[in-house]
Every structure is written in structure tokens, then in C-alpha cells.
Amino acid sequence: MSLRFEISKIGHAARRATLHTPHGEVETPAFMPVGTAATVKGVPQDLLEQLDVQILLSNTYHLYLRPGIDQIRKLGGLHRFMSWPRAILTDSGGFQVFSLSDLRKVTEEGVTFRSHLDGSSHFLSPETATEAQIGLGADIIMAFDECTEYPADASRTRNSMEMTLRWAQRSKKYFEDHKHEVPWQSRQPSAVSHQEKTRFLDSGDESERGFISAARNDSFDKPEQTQALFGIIQGGMDHALRKESAERTIEIGFDGYAIGGLSVGEPRALTREIVESTIEHLPKDKPRYLMGVGTPEEIVEYSNLGIDMMDCVLPTRAARHGLLFTSEGKISIKQARYAGDERPLDPSCSCQVCRRYSRAYLRHLYASNEVLSQVLNTIHNLTYYLDTMRRVRHSI
Ligand SMILES: [Zn+2]
């Protein structure tokens, strides 16, 4: 058993459910914070636990380039490497190859691309992307797909969708043949050596003790369990192709279904239209994951349409640029008008930042380019997103 999706309430189109993964339960609809390089930038894992993050997304492309899949596999997989005992989802790397790398060449076999870090040449295919994701050992992994660009004409959209379907089949085949190679069961030494554990335990520091209890327990090792593989629906902005893509992806058979190829520059009204029409063709008993969205308003809207999982860099990236989401609207903390503002960032927010600091202080940290600015802003924005999802779940 790799994944169990238990729906507890249905309200109109929305569903409230629990996703049982090998690394804990995830209440849905869920927003997944993005930990690109095995870290949600600026926020340590114990704090993410305090914020009640139940699932993180990490990017295969970035980890593949640095520190490398073999390195993470040798260290016991991504959970153990980053000391995160809860659920993780990895993307296939496809989207980053299309959006970040230079000189990519797409063939039926896969994609050859140059690293955005050092220009070195690499190759990702349905087989190698699935192999990489098995090596990382996330609870949920994604089939390798081609994200169709926007705009794209009818024949380009169909050809791209057809290739994604063939790649989905190859991803599934590789996964079925190799799923037992997941690093959870290996008895590799963890990222923390025994000697270091003893030293930390002797230090008596509370936070370090917490770190050790997470690193020591056996929650990283899950014998008898395997990962879950999700398929990705493409088909551009064409309703008929989306329907066909959904039906044929379901025929291949996956543990969950993602809607990909959206938020690629199309108008928001069109995104919503495509999501709504695609959902109709997805099975009711499997999780539905909308990739790469959105604003606080959008994650509410998509949950109400029947989406169960979402991810987006927006709350964390915006935070680092001083853009904060609050119950009173967006605040750009860099503005001089906040220099003498003693009020909390968001009076309705109970996060540790809003309880403790003033807008004036946050504005000062940002203007002075202090590291703490990014940390505090990210904690608030993540809390805002997670609170939004909690409200959505309660309203269903
Ligand atoms: Zn707050």
C-alpha cells in the first residue's frame, strides 16, 4: 500500500479528505510549500512542523544537479537527508528543464539540456526522471511530461500531448519495475552520525534535542511500502484534448492525477475554465493535484472546484521580495509609509511574526537587507496560506 485517499466530506464540488502517505497523513485540500533545493528557503524544518506543514514539494531538477541523486540516495533518501519525517512530493524535473535550462533538445527519447549552474550537459527521460525520483524517495512522485508552451497551435498541442502520454506509459513501466528500490528500507547511516547524536544529546539544548528526536526515530524507514506515482494531464488550452488526455492517462492507471501545463502565461479566466472542464474527467476517488498555482484567492477557488493539492512558489518567493499577504490585502513592506507603523503586519494573523513584531521593524529589516527579513516574511506568508487552507477545509 503506497497511498490511501479517504474522503470524509463533500460539499458541492469540493472534497475534504485525508491522504495517508508512508510518511504521515495530509489533510486536503492542501497547499504544499515549495522546498526547491531540499529547503523552504529561510525556514528550518522544526519550524515547518510547528506551522503544521504536512507535505512539502521538492524539485528533482535542482537536486539532480546539486548535490546529485546518488549522494542523497547514499544518505538514505530525501527525508533523512533533510531531516523531514513528514510527506514529500517531487516533480519529475520536466518543468524546470523547460523553464530554466538553456539549449534543450527534445526528442522522443527524452530531453538533453544544459545545466543552468555550470553549463554541463545532461539527459532526462521518463526512465531517468523516474529513477531519480525513486532515488530521492519522496512519497509521491510525478510522471515525466512535456509542459506545452502557451500559446501553441492545435497540431503542436496534440503532438505534445501524445508524447506526454507515451512518456506516461514509460514512466509507469519504469516505476513498476523499480519501485522497490526506494531508499527507505536501506540501513545506511543517517545524515547525523552516532557520535554527533551523542554530542547533541549531551549538550542539553532544547532545540537540539528536538532535532535529535526527529533524526533518531525510525520515521524515515518504511519497510513494505512504496512510493505513489501520479500521472499528468496536458492538452494545452483545448477542452477536447484535455478530456482525451485525462481519459488516456487514467487508462494507463496512476495513484493520483495532476493537471499540468497551466499558469504558463495564459489569462487567469482561461486557467479556471480548463481546470473546471478537466476535473469533470478525473476519477472521484483519486487525489487531484493542480500544479503551480496560485494566489490566496485562487487556492480557495480551485479547492472549491474539487482540487485536492496545490503548490506554488508565490508565498515564499514574494516574501523574499517584501510582498506580504494579509487579511486586509497585499502589503509591500518596503514602502516608506510603514517606517513608523507600530501595528502588526496582519492583526488577524496569529503567526509568531504578527504576534511579536511591528510593520516598522519588518520594514526596517527589509530596507537594511537583513537575513531575518526573508525569514520572518516567509513565516508569515506560509502561515497565511496554511490558515487559508485550514479555513477552506473547515468550510467543506
Ligand atoms: Zn502573520
Image (cartoon, rainbow, N blue to C red):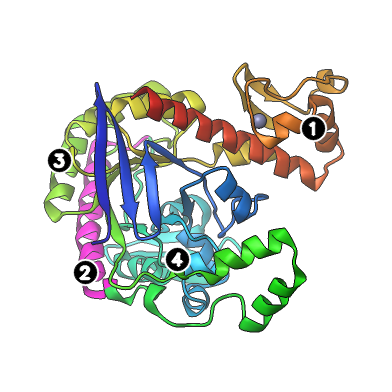
Which quadrant of the rendered structure holds the C terminus?
Answer: top left
Residue type marked 4: Ser
Amino acid type of the residue tagged 2 in the rendering = Glu
Element carrying mark 3: helix
Per the image, the residue denoted by label 1 is: 362
Extent of the magenta region: 151-179
The residue at the point 79 percent across, 23 percent down is 335
Name the residue that disc number 2 marks: 176
* Callout 3 crowding tier (Cα within 10 Å): few <14, some 14–19, many ≥20: some
**Quarter of the render that holds ligand 1:** top right
For label 3, the residue is: 244
Quadrant in the picture for the N terminus: bottom left
Out of 170 and 363, give the one closest to the viewer.
363
Q: Earlier in the sequence, mark 3 or mark 4?
A: 4
Q: Foreground residue, 157 or 318? A: 318
Which label lies toward us, 1 or 2? 1
Q: Quadrant of residue 271?
A: top left
Cβ atoms under marks 1 and 4 closer than 8 Å: no
Of labels 1 and 4, the one closer to you: 4
